[in-house]
Image (cartoon, rainbow, N blue to C red):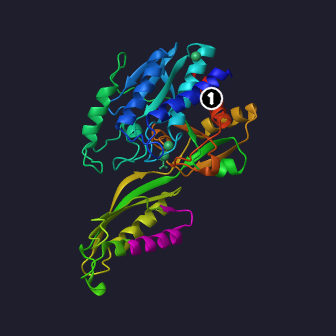
Amino acid sequence: MTTTQLNQLAHRLNQINDLSKGEVGQNRLVYSPTWIAAQQQIIQWGLDLGFQVTVDDFGTAYLDIPGKTNPEQVIATGSHIDTVKQGGRFDGLYGVLGGLEALERLLDADGKPSKTLRLISFSEEEGSRFPETFTGSKHYTGQSINLAMRDPDGISFEAARQAAVSKLDLPGVNHNLPALPVTFTELHIEQGPRLIDHHLQIGLVTSIVGQRRFTVTVKGIANHAGTTPMNDRADALQMAVDLISDLRKNARQVDPQLTFTVGEFHVSPNTSNVIPGRVDFTIDTRHEKETVLDQFEQILHQVVETPRASKITSSVNRWAKSDATQLDQAMLARNQAIADHLGFRSSQLASGAGHDSQIMAQMTRTTMIFVPSINGISHAPEENTSQADLERGVTLLTESLHQQAY
Ligand code: HGY
Ligand code: MN
Ligand code: MN
Ligand code: MN
């Protein structure tokens, strides 16, 4: 490994993260100006390297090294380029830039592959701007997306998509939806504490949890904070707080492993001397068994839709669902053998985070490689991984792709 290659990955990570640094953390929401600047830069790197670059109509970029003998057989790697709000520097982006690094190293060291090597920079995975997750990989695998959905500012997905994708039309870029790959490998930070706590260097992912996201709406009556008697209020916030406390207990009773997260909480009119007339809050639940998620979803509807006070109503809407997914065992075994051969301390584990791989796995053989997250933190500016661990992930990915494509 030359120091330039080692530094090149770090340099590219810094360059893209510097483009999207907000007051707090990374803010690369899909189709935003920081997202456009980042995807443009990745496309330009691909063009400069002489890769064949395609951008689809959702803005996902595909950087190909065409195969010499079996170009129609595609060996792919990649991840997502968008972030959560105030996100970290590695979630998604590490898999995109680590994959680019692997392709460049393979081309430098071994010349053109037999099969096509592809790096994919998926347009969106987080669901942090629009009420839908994995829109990039869902589009690539032929799933339909509601183009009319709107972000909190009322901007439609379609309008934002059109404006952003038109700015990715760099000279030399092709525009079509490429065929699906024969295999897909995603390099990603663990986003949790297991590898770092057990002094491990590599995680080989066996499965990815199922995930469902909901919005609960509570409607009461906005009224004066001073003149409305305490026993005659339709206080939406009080009701929302009671619902969340009850639902958290229900989730624990269904299964202690079921994750229950209220990430967004919107109060209206959100004014100190007005009894809240409306509250909207999100619930994110995850588990490796769909039956557990089904069970909780039933309880969620019962609890929310059972009237508790005369002048207050509450409803629930599920806006995202991705199924628990087993990843490819043979591809995992290959990576396990490579990790052992390289002397990397590894373990096999399930992923509590969702990934594009759970969408790709529905259509092609898919596996994931994790590197440790320092203090297990992710989806926050403190997200961090050591240079040595970043490098080990790229080294393992490079060898795995080499064995498949040459
Ligand atoms: O939310 C997740 O699990 C992923 O990071 N999008
Ligand atoms: Mn991610
Ligand atoms: Mn080079
Ligand atoms: Mn994420």
172 relative position to 147: left or right? right
User: Which quarter of the frame holds ligand 3?
Assistant: top right
Q: Is residue 75 visible?
A: yes
Secondary structure state at the residue bearing disc 1:
helix
The answer to whether mark 1 is within 8 Å of ligand 2 is: no
Q: Residue at x 53, y 32 (%)?
A: 14
Q: Position of residue 115 (x, y in %)?
A: 53, 19
Q: Is residue 406 visible?
A: no
* Mark 1 residue crowding within 10 angstroms, few (<14) / some (14–19) / many (20+): many
Q: Position of residue 71 (x, y in %)?
A: 48, 17
SS assignment for the magenta stretch, majority: helix
Residue position marked by numbered label 1 in the rendering: 400
> In the rendered image of this protein, does residue 341 appear above or below residue 131?
above
The residue lying toward the viewer, choosing from 109 and 338, is 109
Q: Quadrant of the C terminus?
A: top right
Q: Position of residue 279 (x, y in %)?
A: 32, 66
Would you say residue 251 sits in the magenta stretch? Answer: yes
The residue lying toward the viewer, choosing from 68 and 171, is 171
The residue lying toward the viewer, choosing from 93 and 51, is 93
Q: Quadrant of the N terminus?
A: top right
Would you say residue 136 sits in the magenta stretch? Answer: no
Q: For the magenta stretch, what is the residue range?
A: 241-260
- Image quarter of residue 160: top left
How many marks are shown on the rendered structure?
Answer: 1
22 relative position to 373: left or right? left
Q: Position of residue 352 (x, y in %)?
A: 55, 52
Q: Residue at x 41, y 64 (%)?
A: 297
1 relative position to 224: left or right? right
Name the residue type under label 1.
Answer: Ser
> In the rendered image of this protein, does residue 63 appear above or below residue 306?
above
